[in-house]
């Protein structure tokens, strides 16, 4: 009997080991699970907070855990970014390049992004409204408006071509060609003029200067480039047009930048005066891309569009929209922050009163902005705001 027990012992051990092996292996492998769970949790949080780059990196580190969920999240991120990039590329075009068909594409892509994540990054709802507004604006233009615009573009293109400013001529004739290819401009069809001016611009950006071979013009390039950097574009143009020899190509590039910058600033100022703020912002952005510190301060003027729209929205009673514009300006610029804080506070206090004076947090936000405005020395007395808002501002102290 004792012998049989001893003989059975190895069998019992083997059976026990076989039973316990799967559990032991699972226990050994489970050490990686908490790390994967934590990565998944952080990835979902990053996705929720619209930090898509972080989310994608974390999802890719999760491994086999939550495989199907991870696959869906990654697909959503990819599709969302693709839709937003395609739509934004349409809205980034200059006003003359926009048409109803391309805006239809942008609208559908913004709607696609919103179905993926309604509160996703890059403000899809606001961008969608902007695209819809631009499309409505284009469709509402009368034939007379379009004819006047076409004539203006044609005249500018012909004038530029006569002066051999081919790049400038292309900038005017090509938008005309996009809208009306067969339009007769200077005895030529707009589409052909656009192509011809583009080709000439590549070969000869500026007219030849008769004094280019003069030895006295040797220092014109250095003087002209210095004048460009100093924002004296008139002097720069006069000097650079006389450059010849090995520096002529570089001088032509400066001249091209001056021409493009000047056109962009003119378009921006005209659009701003006409309250066409999206057009103005786009044109200022184009000028700033050429020379951010150029004459007329394009970068600051681009930012000021948000401030202007914020204040206009405030007086129209659109407090949420107004605060959004003002917040954008505050992120972009360190100028006029006293004005920004005053009107942000006025927006918040206006909402507080309209919503029944129950939201104490909203009132405190308003007071914090008022304190910042007062600390910056903003008087507020000349601002045409509600007496209740002005009284609150006058009574508040600059420090809590």
Image (cartoon, rainbow, N blue to C red):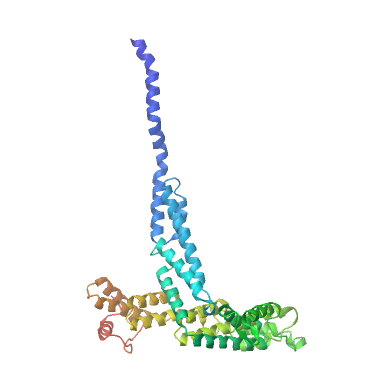
The quarter of the rendered structure image containing the C terminus is bottom left
Pinpoint residue 365: horizontal percent, then vertical percent.
30, 73
Q: Residue at x 65, y 79 (%)?
A: 192
Q: 218 above or below 30?
A: below
The quarter of the rendered structure image containing the N terminus is top left
Question: Residue 339 lies in what quarter of the image?
Answer: bottom left
Q: Residue at x 27, y 71 (%)?
A: 361
Taking 232 as reference, is 38 left or right? left
Taking 235 as reference, is 218 left or right? right
Q: Nearer the viewer, residue 289 or 116?
A: 116
Q: Residue at x 41, y 54 (%)?
A: 43
Q: Nearer the viewer, residue 65 or 117?
A: 117
Pinpoint residue 325: horizontal percent, then vertical percent.
39, 76
**Taking the image as drawn, is residue 65 in sight?**
yes
Q: Nearer the viewer, residue 223 or 343?
A: 343
Q: 302 above or below 55?
A: below
Q: How many numbered discs?
A: 0
**Taking the image as drawn, is residue 91 in sight?**
no
Question: Residue 217 lies in what quarter of the image?
Answer: bottom right
Taking 212 as reference, is 89 left or right? left
Pinpoint residue 22: horizontal percent, then vertical percent.
40, 32
Pinpoint residue 183: horizontal percent, then vertical percent.
60, 83
């Amino acid at each position: 009997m004792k012998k049989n027990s001893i003989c059975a012992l190895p069998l019992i051990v083997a059976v026990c080991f076989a039973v316990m092996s799967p559990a032991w292996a699972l226990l050994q492998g489970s050490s990686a699970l908490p790390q994967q769970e934590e990565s998944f949790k952080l990835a979902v949080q990053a996705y929720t907070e619209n930090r898509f780059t972080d989310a994608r990196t974390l999802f890719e580190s999760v491994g086999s855990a939550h495989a199907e969920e991870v696959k869906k999240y990654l697909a959503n991120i990819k599709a969302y970014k693709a839709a937003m990039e395609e739509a934004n590329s349409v809205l980034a075009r200059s006003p003359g390049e926009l048409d109803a068909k391309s805006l239809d594409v942008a609208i559908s892509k913004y709607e696609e992004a919103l179905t993926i994540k309604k509160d996703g990054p890059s403000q899809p709802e606001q961008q969608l409204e902007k695209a819809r507004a631009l499309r409505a604006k284009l469709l509402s233009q009368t034939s007379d408006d379009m004819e006047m615009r076409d004539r203006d573009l044609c005249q500018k293109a012909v004038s530029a071509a006569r002066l051999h400013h081919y790049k400038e001529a292309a900038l005017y004739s090509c938008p005309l060609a996009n809208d009306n290819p067969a339009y007769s401009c200077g005895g030529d069809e707009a589409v052909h003029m656009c192509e011809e001016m583009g080709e000439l611009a590549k070969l000869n950006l500026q007219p030849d200067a008769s004094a280019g071979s003069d030895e006295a013009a040797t220092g014109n390039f250095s003087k002209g480039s210095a004048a460009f950097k100093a924002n004296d574009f008139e002097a720069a143009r006069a000097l650079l047009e006389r450059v010849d020899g090995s520096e002529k190509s570089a001088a032509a590039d400066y001249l091209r930048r001056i021409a493009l910058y000047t056109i962009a600033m003119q378009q921006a100022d005209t659009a701003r005066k006409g309250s066409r703020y999206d057009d103005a912002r786009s044109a200022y952005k184009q000028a700033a891309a050429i020379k951010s510190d150029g004459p007329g301060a394009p970068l600051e003027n681009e930012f000021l569009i948000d401030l202007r729209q914020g204040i206009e929205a405030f007086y129209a009673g659109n407090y949420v929209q107004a605060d959004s514009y003002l917040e954008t300006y505050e992120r972009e610029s360190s100028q006029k922050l006293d004005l920004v804080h005053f009107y942000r506070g006025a927006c918040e206090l206006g909402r507080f009163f309209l919503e029944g004076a129950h939201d104490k947090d909203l009132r405190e936000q308003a007071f914090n902005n008022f304190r910042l405005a007062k600390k910056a020395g903003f008087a507020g007395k000349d601002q045409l705001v509600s007496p209740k808002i002005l009284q609150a501002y006058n009574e508040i102290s600059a420090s809590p």
